Image: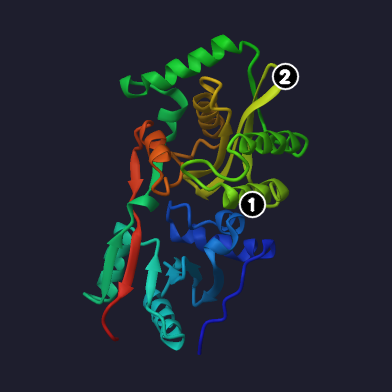
């Protein structure tokens, strides 16, 4: 029998999130928040055994996310194989990192072909490095922050609340307007705008936390994110006016300080992947990530 998948709603958060936590995975995909914000891009969900499973259709190709949970993994993957056979499409697993590849190969020796996807690698940073910006490698970031502080001596940061969400929403609308409506030369922002709109609409219900930067009576930047694992905090969105020198580095620095102070157990900030966009990759690499979470997919080759 096929697995009965459904599109998740806010009501699913309560039962789904414990499975993601139990997986112990730091990747941004293992999160109810990201699944909800990015909608159908994260597919449909179901519970199989002691695991949460996802079915995803992307660019016409069908995948299953690597199961999240703990227990009899072989049983769950066998059910996914049966589901793929029922619908007569290849059995492909997404979000397969090095550890999961070893786990899968131990269960199904030589039966899956693995392919890395560099564009999907998550960038993880030691929170102390982003909060303190120490060392020669981050000297330029310190310089940008210093310049911002000199040019805007009245600057302040504050947690985003229900009262200040409309200010962030207005700033985001203005920010997107600078990219000629919907697109820039490198990146199509239409899907991101929908995801950010959902974040504004359901900010408290999703357990999001954020920080906004003010100077000269206006919001110059904001950022928001959520816990993926107890030691890892995901940065979902970060917007700043690029023409204001230091706005991006200072909201980055201040958010790291804010999370470090509020959650001492957090060791890493996950700033997600670069989607293969040269400008975004350059920006993320400029902070010298401490971990690159390798990801790829696995496709079943042999008949079980």
Determine whether the residue tagged by mark 1 lies in a helix, strand or loop. Answer: helix
**What residue would you read off at disc 1?**
194
Residue lying furthest left? 110
Tag shown at residue 4: none
Q: Is residue 298 above or below residue 261?
A: below
**What residue is shown at x 53% (from left), y 61% (from top)?**
41
Q: Nearer the viewer, mark 2 or mark 1?
A: 1
Visible residue check, residue 262 = no
Quadrant of residue 76 in the image? Answer: bottom left
Quadrant of residue 181 in the image? Answer: top right
Q: Quick one: label 1, few (<14), some, or many (20+) residues within 10 Å? A: some
Residue lying furthest right? 163
Q: Position of residue 274 (x, y in %)?
A: 42, 45
Tag shown at residue 217: 2
Visible residue check, residue 100 = yes
Classify residue 124 as left or right of residue 177.
left
**What residue is shown at x 55% (from left), y 34% (from top)?**
259
Determine whether the residue tagged by mark 2 lies in a helix, strand or loop. Answer: loop
Tag 2 and tag 1, C-beta contact below 8 Å? no
Q: Is residue 95 above or below residue 157?
A: below
CA–CA distance between discs 2 and 1? 27 Å
Q: Position of residue 265 (x, y in %)?
A: 48, 40
């Amino acid at each position: 029998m096929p697995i009965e998948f459904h599109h998740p709603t806010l009501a699913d958060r309560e039962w789904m999130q414990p499975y993601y936590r139990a997986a112990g995975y730091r990747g941004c995909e293992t999160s109810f928040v990201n699944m909800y914000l990015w909608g159908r891009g994260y597919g449909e969900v179901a519970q199989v055994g002691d695991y949460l499973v996802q079915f995803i259709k992307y660019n016409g190709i069908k995948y299953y996310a690597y199961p999240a949970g703990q227990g009899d993994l072989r049983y769950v993957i066998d059910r996914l194989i049966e589901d793929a056979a029922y619908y007569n499409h290849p059995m492909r697993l997404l979000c397969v990192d090095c550890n999961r590849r070893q786990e899968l190969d131990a269960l199904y020796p030589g039966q899956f072909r693995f392919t890395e996807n560099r564009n999907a690698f998550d960038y993880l940073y030691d929170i102390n490095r982003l909060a303190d910006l120490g060392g020669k490698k981050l000297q330029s970031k310190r310089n940008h922050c210093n310049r911002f502080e000199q040019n805007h001596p009245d600057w302040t940061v504050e947690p985003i609340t229900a009262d200040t969400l409309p200010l962030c929403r207005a700033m985001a609308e203005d920010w997107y307007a600078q990219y000629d409506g919907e697109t820039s030369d490198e990146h199509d922002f239409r899907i991101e705008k929908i995801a950010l709109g959902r974040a504004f609409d359901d900010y408290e219900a999703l357990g999001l936390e954020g920080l906004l930067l003010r100077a000269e009576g206006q919001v110059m930047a904001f950022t928001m994110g959520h816990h993926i694992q107890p030691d890892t905090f995901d940065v979902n969105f970060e917007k700043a006016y690029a023409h204001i020198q230091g706005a991006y580095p200072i909201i980055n620095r201040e958010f790291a300080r804010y999370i470090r102070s509020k959650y001492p157990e957090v060791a890493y900030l996950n700033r997600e992947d670069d989607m293969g966009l040269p400008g975004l990759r350059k920006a993320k690499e400029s902070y010298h990530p401490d971990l690159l979470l390798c990801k790829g997919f696995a496709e079943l080759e042999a008949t079980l």
